[in-house]
Each structure stands twice: as C-alpha cells, then as structure tokens.
Amino acid sequence: MSSAVCSKAAVGFMQRRQSRGMTLRQTMVLADKRWAVPELYWQLVTGSFRRYGSSFLMLAISLIFLGGVITPLQSVFLTSKTIKTPTHPGQVYRLTDLTDLTPLGFGDSNLVPVLARSAITSAYNTDPQSRLWTGECVSCKSAVNRNATSFGSQYGNEYDSDRPEACEAGGITLGNMSSLPDPFFAQLPSAYNTGLIEQFLPRINSTVTNERISEDEFPSNCDTLPGAFYMSYGDRTDLYHWSIVACMPADQTFSPWKPVRDRQDFPETLYLNISVDYLQVAYQATGFFQITMNTSAGFFELPNYMNGGIPGPLLDHDPGPLCGPACVAQGDIVPAEEPDSRLDSRDIAKRQVPANGTIITSNSSLALEDVENRGPLLTIAIALFGEGSFISDRVKKPDSCIRDVAFDAPNYGTCIGQVPLQGLMRTTYNKDLENTGLGVCVHNGLRGMASLQEQLAPYIHAFYYDEDDGAKAGRISNAFNAAAFLANEAWMTSPTVDATLDVYYDEGADTLVPVISTAGIVTISLLLAADLIFSEDIDGFRGN
C-alpha cells in the first residue's frame, strides 16, 4: 500500500518544478520504484547518496519502513482469547418459589413431617448432598481454624489436618455442616451454573444452638399453652426410669413463613427435659435443654460467567429489580398477601393415653399436624416425637416391636429398621460415638418389655447435650443442623407444592476474539499516525 502511494506521488513530483534539478540517475531511481529495493539502501549508506538520493526518495523510504514495521508489531501485541457467545437458552421447569409455598390455603396433611422423618431416619453423615450449598468456596489448599472439641480429637488423627473438614471427609456432606461457611439449601445442584444468563433461586439456611438451662427456665404448663407443641414420654415402672418432655411454647398455629421474595428471618425454640437412670445406659443423666433454630430465607444469584461462578449472597429484597441486561424473567414475581394460617384453638384436642406403664401426653401436637408451612424445627419435633415417630410407635404399640420367642427365625438379631437421627449423630467419618449405647439399627431380637426399654432409654439419652463432652455435644448440634437441612428440603420439594419458578441457562458457544493491550494500542496508533502524516507529505508532491 505504501509503495502504491509513492508510485502515484512520484509522477506528480517529477512533473513539478522541484524535480528539475534532479539528475537522470535520480529520476530513474524513482521511476523504477527502487525505494523498495534493499540494494539501494546499501548504496545510499556507502557514499552514493548524491548519485541516487533525493528528498522524495528519503520520504518514500521512511513511509515504506513504517508500513513494513506496523504489521509485525501488530502480531507481537495482538493475542486472542476464547469468549462465550449466546446460543439458544435451555430451561429448568417447575422449581419452587417462596411465593408458591404459602398462599395455598390448605395443609399438607402432615406429609412434610413424614418426608422429613424418612430422610432423618435414613441419612448418614457421609451421604453426598447435591443440594447443600456453601456461601464461600471450600478450598482444600487453604488452612482453617477448627475447634477440636467440636467433633472430638479422641478418634485418632482424623481431625489433625489444617485442611477444611470437607476435604478430609471427601466432600461437602451432612457430617461437616457445622464447619461449612454459610451452608444452605437450594433446589438445584450446588455445581449449577447458568452461564450467560443471570438467574435467581430461593435459598434457606437454618442454624442451631444447643444449650443447657435451669429447671426454672423450662416453660411451665406447656401442655396448657394455646397452640404449643407438647409431647411427654416416660417409663414409670420400678425397673426402668427414663422420660423426655418436648415443648415448643410459642403458638405454632401461626406459620412463620411469609409469601414474599424479600429476605425473612425467624427463630424457633424447642425445650427438652431429659431424664435417664438405667443401668444399661453408660451415663445416667438429668437435664433441661434449649434448642434454638434461626432460619433465614430469600433469594440469591445463581453462579454464572459474570459473577465468576460463585453463588451470590442472600438478598435483602425481591431480586426482580436486580435483573440486568443478562437476566431473563422468572415467572410471577409479584408477592402474594400473607395468609392467616391460625387454627381455631377450639379445634385443638387434648389426649392422655396410658399404656404399659408409659405415659403419652399431647395437647396440640395432633392439631399441628394439620398446620401448613411449619418452621423447620417444628417439622423436626413432629418427626422425632409426634404421631408415628420412633418413640411414639414403641410406646403406644409395644407388642408390634417385640418378637415371640417361639417364633424366632434364622435371621434373629438382624437389622430390620433404622433409628431416627442416629446416623447423623455419628462422627464425620460415620463412626459410632463412644458410650452412646445405641446403634443405627433396629434389630428383630427384642424379647419382652425389658428389651424394648433397653432400646428406648439409650435413644432418649442420645438427645442429652453435655457441654463438657465436646465430641457428643458437637455431634448433637451438627445432627440438628443436618436435620434442619433435610426438613427444609422436604418442605421445598413436597409434591403438594404448585411449583411455578423456571430457571434459564445458556452455556454459550466458544468464540475466538482478538485481544490487544493498552500499550500495543498506543504504539500501533502512533505508528499509524506517522504513516498517515508521511503519506500526506508524499501525496503533497503531486500538487493536489
């Protein structure tokens, strides 16, 4: 290009008056376009400038030089990178919106506690949980400070490493929930990425604190409080002495949930009165305990290319106004009015059913089975202590749990069921804690009431929170954190929910694009500017 400009300008230059002093040899150099011949450069620098050189020739050589270096320099500064360009988006249908859960106006007929009970019974600490998210990435290369007493250092050197516990346990599991940074439930798998599209999803996080309290701090007359959850089980015979009282004194006929997408926080409190005095149990203990569960729910931004593949924080408000150019609308974002889920207190019945020396007392628990949208702690309480629970069935129908010696089978003593929550009270590595007196299996070898009580007493003792026993105390708190996760999952994925939320995603197509640094842009721009200036000067010789 530079040579072509010089060729056109040379004709005009030689026809103008300034070229009349040029020799024939100098004119022939321009006519033959020898500015592009390297041999001429050698002749010029070795003393032949007077014979061949001219002002036009020097300007042409400068222009040729600039044109020759710009392209190689561009290749030096210019690189390429792969970007994602939009394609046809995909869609995940019928996920649960927080506004889907509350305005239905009818209960789940106790389905959610039953689902939670099944999950709590079958879950183990080492089970992988695809819907268990963390607010921060768990890096197996970073060191964290952990309280060795939370999970017990007496189980070998399992917890001596400086790596996060999730790395030692083979991933994010229920067993290390208490050590995870901001763990929460969301309906899509934790590795989900929406790519080029910005999308939001509900999340729920429930955190448990467990503490011993005095007898005076335990709610009095819980069985008479309107809307309270109250269950009492105990053996009153001379041979055995164990009892447990579970009380949630607040009016549970009000749902703590609101049908909004804004952030919502609420606490729940469960009180336990535990007494165990039985020789077959390693520890005889009596105590009053308060389990407080703080639940936070709202929306968060799903991982995508724009946020670096990291889940966003819990949002304070409806995510609708946050939808940017990369966002796709997700269903109906208009919040519904908060329903009044209070039950008529006249419908709450009281029951007292003595059976086989064991007393069951329940005033509101039966009515609470019809409450819709319970909090996670109430769901757990009904699952562990309500109708159809492990302890309720054995206290009310002991004969169904005891084998007649005359009908012993060859599989005597084998596992025929599981004990609720016990799989979550084991260590992170799924080992039994020492001196608990109860495993995860229900065996078919129970003979008579004595064997049944030998099973129930350790089960009650498993809930005994001893702050001086760091290993067991940490596992109880972690077990309730895990149970809360499973209860929230049961509620959000219940088949009674009319899910309306869709999530869109677009992984994009790989496209190669050029990239040049700022220094490269400046350098090439200066050279191009000089090239244009010299071209203008060359063109000026034509007299245009």
Image (cartoon, grey):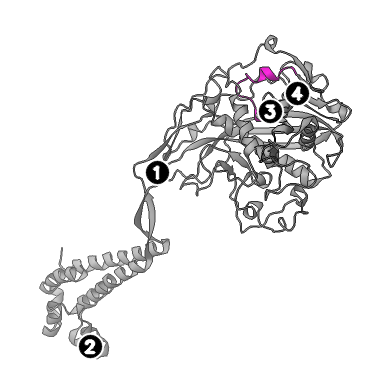
Element assignment for label 3: loop
Depth check: give the residue in front, 58 or 103: 103
Measured from the top left, where is residue 78 in percent x and y?
36, 64
Question: Regarding mark 2 in the picture, which secondary structure is present there?
Answer: helix
Dot 3 crowding, Cα within 10 Å, few <14, some 14–19, many 20+: some
Image coordinates of residue 524 in percent, x first then y, are 34, 65
Q: In front of the other: label 2 or label 4?
A: 4
Name the N-terminal-most of marks 3 and 1. 3
**What residue is shown at x 78% (from left), y 34% (from top)?**
451
Packing grade of label 1 (10 A; few <14, some 14-19, many >=20) is many
Please say whether residue 303 is visible from this viewpoint.
yes
| Among numbered discs 3 and 2, the one appearing first in the sequence | 2
Q: Horizontal placement of 102 versus 429: left or right?
A: left
Cα distance in 3D space between marks 1 and 4: 51 Å
**Amino acid type indicated by mark 1:** Asp
- Alpha-carbon distance for marks 3 and 2? 104 Å
Earlier-in-chain disc, 2 versus 1: 2
Residue 262: in sight, yes or no? no
Figure quadrant of residue 476: top right
Which amino acid is tagged 3?
Ser
Question: Residue at label 4?
Answer: 231
The residue to which callout 3 is attached is 389
Residue visible at 67% across and 17% down? Answer: 367
Q: How many marks?
A: 4
Magenta residues, start to end: 362-378
The alpha-carbon separation of the residues under discs 3 and 4 comes to 11 Å
Q: Which mark is residue 43?
A: 2
- Residue 280: x and y in percent read 84, 39
Provide the residue designation for mark 1. Answer: 506
